[in-house]
Amino acid sequence: MASNDLAADVLLVLAVVGEAMCVLGLLAGRSAIDKLHYAGAASTVPPCLVAAALVVKERGSQPAINAIVVAVLVLVLGSVVNHMTARVARRRSVGQLTARESEIRRP
Amino acid sequence: MNAWLAAAAALLVFIVPCGAIVVRGTRMEALVALELVTTLSTLVLVLLAEGFHRSSYMGVALVAAGASFVGNLIYLRFVEREL
């Protein structure tokens, strides 16, 4: 097996393992905010690993460029969606975005 | 079956437990699980495009990445209006 194929396969396995960990975290999370941490993580490292696997396999061809664009889109847009979801979840659970007095730890 | 298709199949399997949370969880938990499902589905499309050696399929993944963002924001907007 060529070294490029091996490297691409290793990156793919790492991406799948990363997504598996995020799904397990989503299942184990107790609240929506806890689950959101894992949903956010799923849109950061694994897409970059998939794009890296494609770049290793295809070098500078069109599929590799497309994969990089998809990874950047998922990374940036996923972060925006996560932030919006956190804001809505916070307002639903507490009623306000700012910290309550009981949540502030004073020295 | 190559490594790309196997990875796509594995990610498809991961969608099932997320779907269970969408069905059985609270509204916010369902929204969070839906976000993860859209991320997984976009990655599946990229992997399928490479697995079948059809670079034209990558366009579907590009559109899915943008459309899932818009769809998630619309759901969030509806949930926010309930407040």
Image: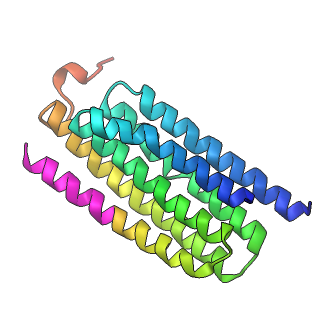
Q: Residue at x 60, y 52 (%)?
A: B9
Colour mode? rainbow
Q: Which residue is drawn at 60% across and 65% down?
A: B48
Q: Which residue lies furthest to the front in this view?
A: B1
Q: Is residue A44 above or below residue A96?
A: below
Q: Position of residue B58 (x, y in %)?
A: 55, 75
Q: Is residue B72 magenta?
A: yes
Q: Give the range drawn in magenta.
A: B69-83
Can residue B21 be seen by looking at this rendering?
yes
Main SS of residues in magenta = helix
Residue in the foreground of this view, choosing between A22 and B55: B55
Residue in the foreground of this view, choosing between B19 and A23: B19
Q: In this view, does B31 lie above or below A77?
A: above
Tell whether A48 sits left or right of A97: right
Q: Is residue B5 magenta?
A: no
Q: How many marks?
A: 0
Q: Is residue B50 above or below residue A21?
A: below
Q: Is residue A26 above or below residue B66?
A: above
Q: Residue at x 60, y 55 (%)?
A: B8
Q: Position of residue A9 (x, y in %)?
A: 77, 55
Q: Where is residue B55 in the image (x, y as percent from the top left)?
A: 62, 79
Quadrant containing the N terminus of chain B is: bottom right
Tell whether A14 sits left or right of B77: right
Q: Which residue lies furthest to the left in this view?
A: B82
Q: Which residue is drawn at 64% across and 49% down?
A: A15
Q: Quadrant of residue A97?
A: top left
Quadrant containing the C terminus of chain B is: top left
Q: Quadrant of residue A55?
A: bottom right
Can residue A97 be seen by looking at this rendering?
no
